[in-house]
Amino acid sequence: MDKIIIKLNKDVREKVIDICNKFNNDPGELINVLHQTQDFLGYLPAEVQELIAECLHIPTAKVYGVVSFYAFFTMTPKGKYPISVCLGTACYVRGAEKVLDAFKKELNLEVGQTTPDGKFSLTCLRCVGACGLAPVAMVGDKVYGRLTPADIKGIVDEYRNME
């Protein structure tokens, strides 16, 4: 059986192997390995999933299954300023869909995409835990509440003007 050649730069490859080794290459630690790898790299491309599978001695399909099942994991790079709009019940009934549409229009993006300059990415989530502030969106770890579509340009401009 031919071995798959994974095309990752040496530093990334070594760091991913170090993360797997930190968890003793234990298949039961797959989620922890994926979390730490995504924290390091920002996302989990196919080549990284293949390397993790090799290190943990499990099928790549199992790694892919976990990555694709949990919404926390992403296979595409996020923007420098990831935007997440809450579509949980409280936010939804208070207009989150209109807030999401305003972000899409302002950034010229669809959900799951990243701007060509890599500054912004747009996702949805189910609950931020700030229902009293609904509708809510997050930019990175910062929560913005009681949003209206009119607020969105100002929020985006705040981050556009950062270095």
Image: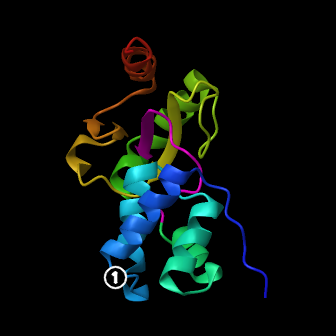
The residue that appears at 48% across and 49% down in the rendered structure is 124
Residue nearer the viewer, 3 or 155: 3
Q: Is residue 101 above or below residue 15?
A: above
Instruction: Please indicate, yes or no, whether residue 72 appears anywhere in the rendered image.
Output: no
Rendered residue at 54%/58% (across/down): 44
Task: State the predominant SS element of the stretch in magenta.
Answer: loop
> Magenta segment, which residues?
71-85
Q: Is residue 143 above or below residue 57?
A: above
SS label for mark 1? loop
Q: Nearer the viewer, residue 42 or 128?
A: 42
Count of all numbered marks drawn on residues in the image:
1
Instruction: Give the quarter of the image for residue 133.
Output: top left
In the rendered image, the quadrant that contains the N terminus is: bottom right
What amino acid is at disc 1?
A: Asn
Residue 10, percent across and down?
A: 54, 53
Can residue 19 be seen by looking at this rendering?
yes
Quarter of the image with the C terminus is top left
Residue 79, x across and y down, in percent: 50, 36
Q: Locate residue 39, reporting x and y percent.
A: 37, 53
Q: Residue at x 48, y 50 (%)?
A: 11
The residue tagged 1 is 24
Query: Residue 130: percent from the left, percent from the top?
Result: 23, 49
x 42%, y 14%: residue: 157
Residue 80 falls inside the magenta stretch: yes
The 10 Å Cα crowd at callout 1, few under 14, some 14 to 19, many 20 or more, is few
